[in-house]
């Protein structure tokens, strides 16, 4: 049972993605290439490295290059600070290999939108604000004037990661996004996941802009605004993913 | 004295810019091409059309394609609504022809950042929060923990628009941004302006992401969140530009 | 009746095209921008400038940026020189505005192929070697083992230039080429023309590689291999276009 | 001692390169992805796979996607056929990983030129026609009116493949090519090699256009014009590379 990624496997993956990001025009700096670029979503997903990123097998892992995570509190009236954690600006490029996924989750604070710059993006989402009995405040105390648009039927070709099918069940809506399409917004507190078609010639490359990202990774956390370091804003449906920050087990070899 | 742009001049300009935007990979939709794309910054700037956009003469006008202007209030606790006008997400592509400028201004609410995707961008700015005696709240009541970085000396080659030199005086800092450079943040309440080098082979093409844009134009205003339609958030230094929303005088021909 | 283009009209056109070429990644050098970039195919086509390049009216004119025109005779056994004028390597970027065309013609010597990098290209062609009674040598004395592929029906939307419809009649085949499509070869001695759909958001931008180009323009001719300067290799069907090298009448203004 | 590449290693390499090619705008078709894309230049170069393509170790191997290899004999007067093997048109995209090389060689028939579309290309070449005592015809019987341009000094950072340093000795000239540079021509019968700087963030991606390519590989050979299948036109300096067509030993795993 694979419980790690080797240094070579990790570097090959991230190097390949960095080159693709640069080819797609994203302003990757050397400082943006580090051990938290690859997001491996749970211990059982290291199995993806047995046959490699190009095996087209369904696993939850992908790469993120973050160009900016700006709290945007400068010049804000101090009275507004309490709500600033719902604002801010974050700019990322995400790269998902064919057959791979980002695990279903929602953000309490963060609204985000996508622009596909290469390939095709399968987006899965729930059209309504999540209401799972664990909300810190009642739905009635939130602004909720515009639900997300209805999507299409899931295409038959989608093969979900083994043992994780259940966490996708509430994401009833589907959209396929392509280069040139309008920006696609996912509002905060809405369940979403995404993937790359398994028979694609290229990974899907996605620009994501969002509010400040209260990072899900241990490495990313180090760069956060100090006052916000305790915040977990990535709520995954798959059991166990929320218990701690995501971190990669990279071993020599 | 020119006091208008003809329909043909306007359409030629915007069509050329739309094609360039698409060539640069920006997801321009037909609905994003309209009579508020071209931003002509004051009555005296129509003179730019006498010799045309490629004359390399210094004037203040440029084009904006706005792909998204999202209040991002969905799912926000109602208690936070009062501060939401400092948040939100806006995504634009801006195109400035050689020798042309965006006029010096600041936003009370909006923080923004730039990514150059073609050509070179001359950025001019003030490193400190503006303090012009007209602030609605005192500097001490704002968050102000990180000033903007020092810039470089202005290059000698810059030729400012005739009669508007004075409005650039407080923008002491300069940066030249190019494709591949790190994203450049301009915080709210900081004076800024920008331009395209006059001897350039191409217009400069800039991705701008920011907080919600409380549009400076009459046409753009129509699309704003209703509760925020009264807000003016673009404060220009040049006399007269703030008195009303910017609107284009386009005449037949 | 328009019989010229003004300096400003010409420069605006070529500057716009050069910027678009660079945005599409073509290696445009300043030396490649000159008075033979714009190809205006006959005296009556200056009328295109009355309403301008973006009027979508049907005229025959487009822009060519030539990065290389290499005889490729270096290192050739001298015995092969007599046939070298059928060889060589030429690399160009062509930009056709919506509704505009390249006039029907064939080359006695030059085989060429297209790769569309932006927009859509309407290609019109004849599937067989031309046999117009004016051939210098008999069809039987040429290699002719592979005809060009059959095309599609012409789409109804095509509006041909006024008074030139007849010259398109023998180009019975049609193909629409888009970015990502296989390279499309037009063999020597085959009639061809092309255009950009009139309702397009962008000009069509085409990489053309071919054998040595025995230039149709007076300016281009100056750069040719001396021994080949007398050669005319562009045979246009429209009467009058073959009588001399094409040259632009550009007047002050 | 490594004497093969595994199926997985090979597919990972070629899949990565195909995605990068598409991201760079090259029109890759599924039929262009096969077992002759990866060019491994000799038995001892399989060692490159021990630490992988991203190890930055110096080896001679790279990927080629060939979009077109057109003899361009259609419509040629039959009397010219004897010389047609010096003509034709070939269009390729080549991808070299950091630290890797194409081995020094020359073509008897083929003139070629480069356009870098991503990264930096180290080009090494000899400025004069090769004269190695093995020429089929005398130098005096060839056209030789224009030598290649002088280059720069080799940069100190270049680390050549182990045991192959000698084959680079006669390539005294060096040029670094970057996106936007003028096309760089290598005339037939001139020694050349190239590589990607070992500390680069991306592989170098190069468009190569040339005369017809009398393929060096066994797989490529199958697609050649029948009359020309016997021709070897790739003359490598390293001993042993010329004895047969290059072919890959790909084993299960």
Image (cartoon, coloured by chain):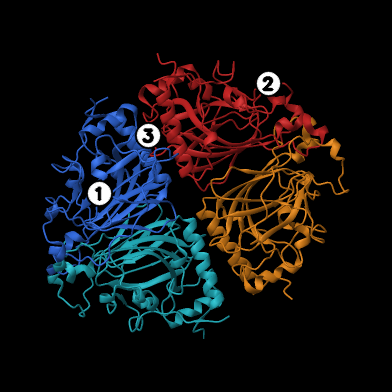
Chain colours: A red, B orange, C cyan, D blue
Q: Nearer the viewer, mark 1 or mark 2?
A: 1
Residue C2 visible in image? yes
Mark carried by residue D56? 3
Kindly identify which chain the residue marked by label 2 belongs to: A
Q: Nearer the viewer, mark 2 or mark 3?
A: 3
Q: Give me the C-alpha separation between circle 1 and circle 2.
A: 63 Å
Q: Give me the C-alpha separation between circle 2 and circle 3.
A: 40 Å
Give the structural element (helix, strand or loop) at label 1. Answer: loop
Tell me if C73 is positioned left or right of A132 in this view.
left
Mark carried by residue A230? 2
Q: What residue did someone put label 1 on? A: D170
Residue A58 rendering spot, x and y as whole percentages: 42, 26
Residue C160 rendering spot, x and y as whole percentages: 42, 72
Residue at the outermost top position: A1
Mark 1 or mark 3, earlier in chain: 3
Residue C121, quarter of the rendered image: bottom left
Residue at the outermost bottom position: C1
Residue D197 rendering spot, x and y as whole percentages: 39, 41
Q: Residue drawn at (59%, 17%), measured in percent from left and top?
A: A244
């Amino acid at each position: 049972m694979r419980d790690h990624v080797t240094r070579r496997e990790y570097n090959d993956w991230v190097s390949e993605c960095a080159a693709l990001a640069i080819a797609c025009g994203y302003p990757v700096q050397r400082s943006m290439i580090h051990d938290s670029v690859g997001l491996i979503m749970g211990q059982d997903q290291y199995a993806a490295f047995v046959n490699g990123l190009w095996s087209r097998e369904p696993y939850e892992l992908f790469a993120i290059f973050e160009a900016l995570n700006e709290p945007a509190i400068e010049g804000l009236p101090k009275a507004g600070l309490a709500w600033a954690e719902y604002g801010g600006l974050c700019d990322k490029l995400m790269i998902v290999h064919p057959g791979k996924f980002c695990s279903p989750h929602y953000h309490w604070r963060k609204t985000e939108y996508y622009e596909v710059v290469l390939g095709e993006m399968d987006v899965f989402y729930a059209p309504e604000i999540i209401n799972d009995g664990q909300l810190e405040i009642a739905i009635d105390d939130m602004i909720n004037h515009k639900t997300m648009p209805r999507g299409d039927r899931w295409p038959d070709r989608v093969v979900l990661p083994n043992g994780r099918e259940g966490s996708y069940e509430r994401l009833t809506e589907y959209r396929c996004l392509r280069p040139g399409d309008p920006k696609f917004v996912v509002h905060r507190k809405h369940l979403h996941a995404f993937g790359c078609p398994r028979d694609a010639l290229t990974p899907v490359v996605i620009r994501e802009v969002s509010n400040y990202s209260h990072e899900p990774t241990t490495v990313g956390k180090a760069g956060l605004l100090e006052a916000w370091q305790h915040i977990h804003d990535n709520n995954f449906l798959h059991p166990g993913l929320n218990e701690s920050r995501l971190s990669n087990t990279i071993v020599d070899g």
